[in-house]
Amino acid sequence: MSIKHLDRLLAPRSVAVIGASGKPHRVGTRVLANLAAGGFAAAGKIWPVNPKYTELHGMPCYARVAALPEAPDLAIICTPMATIVGLIAELGARGTRAVIVMTEVSGRAQRQALLDAARPHLLRILGPGSIGLQAPALGLDASFTHGPAGAGKLAFVSQAGALAGAVLDWAGERGIGFSQFVTLGDDVDVDFGDLLDYLAADAGTEAILLCVEDLRSARKFMSAGRLAARAKPVIVFKLGARQELDGSADLVFDAAIRRAGMLRVHSTEDLFDAVATLARHRPQRGERLAVLTNGASLALVAADALAAGELRPAPVSPATRKRLAQQGLAIAASSTANSTANSTANLAINLPADAPVAQYVAAAGALLADDQTDALLFLHAPAAMVTSDAVAQALAPLFQAGGRNVLSCWLGGVSAASARRQFADAGLPTFETPETAVHGFLQMAQYRRNQALLMEVPAGVPGTAAPPRAAARTLVKAALATHRKEQEKNKGPVVLSDDEARSLLAAYGIALATPQQAALAGHTPAAVRIGIGIDRVFGPVVFFGQGGLAAEGLADLTADRTAGLPPLNMVLARDMVGRTRISRLLAQGQTAADAEALVRTLVQVADMLTDVPELAELDLNPVLAIGGAVVALSARLQLAAPRSRRTLAIRPYPQELEQTVAWNGGDIVLRPIRPEDAAQHQAFFHALDADDVRLRFFTAMRELPPAQLARLTQIDYDRAMAFIATRPLAGGGAETLGVVRAVLDPASQSAEFAIIIRSDLKGKGLGYILLGKLVDYFRSRGTAEIVGDALAENLGVQKLVRHFGGVVLPHQEPGMVRLQLPLK
């Protein structure tokens, strides 16, 4: 996860085109022409390289890399495959730190040779097989696409060059621009994870759109995607989604995108809708969509489209009707209110066909002023009495300033073209049909739900005892020893006996049914199936869905099930269950205790999956919730060598870092923070003095807002660490005494840290214990230094840093100091 030297790739000051040409139909010809045509030529340096020319596009052409006046920030290689490795090595030695390889390179050995040539120089490679990139704000068109991208706030990253070209053309027709437009090609080096890290911190990018064919590093992608999605919308379109027969890979990909807080779209139509919506979106307030139209039938079409997404139009509030009536505008709720099933009553403001422009303005203003309106859908059909152009001219500035997301559909051809153009110029998304406009809103609503899931604070798992990892390891070791000869003979996984399976499941609180419980199976409303699988990309995964004999067939197995990436908590597991159709049947006959027990079982299976790397197969079918407990009528478990499994896509809680130490006459536990610590962490915050809060957060705060509390407790252990000091409470539970945290900078080998001790416990040495724990951890990871900012009056943290060999440096901001603690 490094963005080192990506600035040389995405914001270069000089570019060399190696293989530049003047011959038609050559890649080097098109690339140089695009570079020369953009605004980059005025501010940056462009150097063609080709021994056959002395000049191209009025610029000197150099015979070889060594002849260039200086090392280019970026080199674009358009020469045959046999020359590329040597060119990368030469460019790296010269000082170039980024290249785009447009030539196709076949074979793993050839791709590895590119990396081997680049690695000694920390040179970044985009490609091979990339069609290049564009940074419109810089006037940089380092691509061989057919036209330049307009400037905007949407970043587009794609592995597929052909699809990128289609998006570029489609967006250009609609006046949609981009902050970055990048094609990865074969992504041997620079990949989605790198660009997500870069774009997450890019002030010029407000939303990110990814077109994914395949992923090489699931953990890197998930880590970077989660970080980026916390900062701005990230939309993902997966190509080749349903190539596997049973559809499991697509389920897993969908689960991964949801888990990271991103939004997935499923078709090129959805992709284009997402471009239109994202390019002109505001933060979404909620899911109440008000509808304003000049045709009742259009409102019904919109209502049907919303119903397909399990939403309804926002009712027109009495306050809005009263406001319009006060302006002399009595708006009927519907002109077809003779049927409750197919009526727009209270679902839209339906203006008459002969309504003047003033009525459109009054109705739109009333809806935008209504607190019950989260977003507005405007649908307009051509009318004889007032032109679409006149309506658009009046509404565009109102919608621009309205503070709500507005989606529009101007039906009609030539008569509506000018209206669409006016809305596009005003930054208002327009769609071809009411259904696509509604679909754009549903995308925003689903993204908002994914974000809410990302930020939701989980409670602890109810009814859990001490972590069963040690007991599970003992059981697995014994089972492998028992079956060693069998495994050596068959060279395959070990199938556990019923007794072995029962013991391992029991360690995680999962019971196999007794004969009496099995007899109750016919009296339960529904049976479910819980299992695990090993995905080619994302590694171990948990499945949940319909159980019983119906689930044994392949078609039925894929019909109603969901996937989740371990580790899971109660919030994530509950979401998994709720996304199945079987959950509705379960809800009809389950008690609350049964429902919680089923959710808890998913968490326990995920825990088993993280604790037991040998677990290759687990299939519990059917599974019943009876009397507040979960039992499996049948279980199949297999063990295999850990090396045959994929790494978890999300790093689980690092239990091995837990440590008990003596302090202040007793024992305390130092451990990584986890999502279930949210309530305990809020209580810790409430115990801090106002001045200590100000010294830590640089502002006054009485409460940690939910989103910030989630960010502080739901950390990515791959790129951050937070250690808390805890001790047990007399009445049960534990209290937090202090916390130290640091986040790795993907652009360097440094980690930014902060520390705070409960106000009544300062001066007792706890800060030294916590910072020492953090120093040891990051030193073991090879991190170069720990750095931080502090108020100059915070003498305690300065003393702490000096104790560990650090220094206190001047800061560019008055009243601040920079803390630096070398680890190497």
Image (cartoon, grey):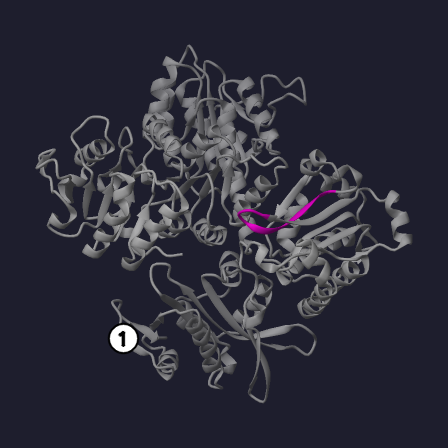
> Magenta stretch: dominant SS?
strand
Q: Name the residue at 64% across, 37% down.
A: 246
* Vertical order, 322 against 83 (above or below): above
* Residue stretch in magenta: 535-546
* Vertical order, 491 against 135 (above or below): below
Residue 554 in sight in this render: yes
Q: Decide which of 167, 667 is in the foreground and name it.
A: 167
* Vertical order, 701 against 33 (above or below): below
> Label 1, on which residue?
809
Q: Where is residue 285 in the image (x, y as percent from the top left)?
A: 49, 43
**Dot 1 surroundings within 10 Å: few (below 14), some, or many (20 or more)?**
few
Q: Name the residue at 60% across, 59% down.
A: 642
Three-letter code, disc 1:
Leu
Name the element at disc 1: strand
Task: Please check the rendered image and state whether residue 541 is part of the magenta-colored stretch, yes or no.
Answer: yes
Q: Name the residue at 24% across, 26% down.
A: 25
Q: Tell me: 330 left or right of 797.
A: right
Question: For the view shown, which residue lies furthest in the front direction?
Answer: 489
Q: Tell me: 560 left or right of 386.
A: right
